[in-house]
């Protein structure tokens, strides 16, 4: 009897132990997985100005997910991709696809888009005229001089009937591609950040919307604008090719693409920029 009693107790003890192990396994399975890297830190290159306000909110959202973001501020569009290629930053957020394509063609960068941010429709601004029709013969119109934005600006002028571009001209059009100029307009090529600030000395200027905001131009001074539908100039977050599928990249993108950041975006850009994801 004692032997059977001991055996019965052994069965009970073994059963209890197995139950405890099973319960522990279930709890472990049900518990939320720890952050992919609770102390993961990255550097993100952005442009000086309004983007600093946006990215403070992005950093706050990322911190909730275990990702620490340090922003690195640039004042020149040519610098963020070079810094990313060299590994001085882990990501950047400042450009659209035509610009990156041109940069890759010129420099052989190994950089790819991972998540859209916003779009700033480029527009034709003037302080002298109320409509495109009022722009006189011989007017001087400023356009950005970098390859992607110059082509973008020229397409706006073409859509308004001010010039005609050579058939088959792509998004990297230059003044050399102008085949028709009925008003004999002088197209003045300037740095993208200078066009808006030079508007008093021009009859009109095609200005990137973020630079228009920095230059104090208002939507009331915009007499034409590129279409928003199917716009190829949406800005995005970019990383090195090798990192495109990394967990921290997914966290970075989700930390930008949410309602909290959108609210800050709308507040900062006052309708001149639009969320593009």
Image (cartoon, rainbow, N blue to C red):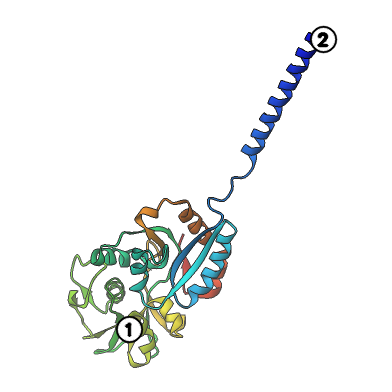
Label 2 SS: helix
Pick the front one: 256 or 129: 256
- Residue visible at 42% across and 71% down in the picture: 120
The correct choice, above or below, for 193 with respect to 100 in the image is: below
Pick the front one: 188 or 168: 188
- Residue visible at 46% across and 59% down in the picture: 277
Horizontal side of residue 237 vs 8, given as left or right: left
Q: Residue furthest bottom?
A: 201
Label 1 SS: helix
Mark 1 = which residue? 133
Q: Position of residue 21 (x, y in %)?
A: 67, 30
Q: Position of residue 190 (x, y in %)?
A: 29, 83
Count neighbours of disc 2 (C-alpha within 10 A) and say few if under 14, some if 14 to 19, many if 20 or more.
few
Name the mark nearer the viewer: 1 or 2: 2
- Residue visible at 29% across and 70% down in the picture: 148
Q: Position of residue 241 (x, y in %)?
A: 35, 55
Which label is found at residue 2? 2
Q: Is residue 129 visible?
A: no
Q: Residue furthest front?
A: 2
Query: Mark 2 or mark 1, which is nearer the start of the sequence?
Result: 2
């Amino acid at each position: 009897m004692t032997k059977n009693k001991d055996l019965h107790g052994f069965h009970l003890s073994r059963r209890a132990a197995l139950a405890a192990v099973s319960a522990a396994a279930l709890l472990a399975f049900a518990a939320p997985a720890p952050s992919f890297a609770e102390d993961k830190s990255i550097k993100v290159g952005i442009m000086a100005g309004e983007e600093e306000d946006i990215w403070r909110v992005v950093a706050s959202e990322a911190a909730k997910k275990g990702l620490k973001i340090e922003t690195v501020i640039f004042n020149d569009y040519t610098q963020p991709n070079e810094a990313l290629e060299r590994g001085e930053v882990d990501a950047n957020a400042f450009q659209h696809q035509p610009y990156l394509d041109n940069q890759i063609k010129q420099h052989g960068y190994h950089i790819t888009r991972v998540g859209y941010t916003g779009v700033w429709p480029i527009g034709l601004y003037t302080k002298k005229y109320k409509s495109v029709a009022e722009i006189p013969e011989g007017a001087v119109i400023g356009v950005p001089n970098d390859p992607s934005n110059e082509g973008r600006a020229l397409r706006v002028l073409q859509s308004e009937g001010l010039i005609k571009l050579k058939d088959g001209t792509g998004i990297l059009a230059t003044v050399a591609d102008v085949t028709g100029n009925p008003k004999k307009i002088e197209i003045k090529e300037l740095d993208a950040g200078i066009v808006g600030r030079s508007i008093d000395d021009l009859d009109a200027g095609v200005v990137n919307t973020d630079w228009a905001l920095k230059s104090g131009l208002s939507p009331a001074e915009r007499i034409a604008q590129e279409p928003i539908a199917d716009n190829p100039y949406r800005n995005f977050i970019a990383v090195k090719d090798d990192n495109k599928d990394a967990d921290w990249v997914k966290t970075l993108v989700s930390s930008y693409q949410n309602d909290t950041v959108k609210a800050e975006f709308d507040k900062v850009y006052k309708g001149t920029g639009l969320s593009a994801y």
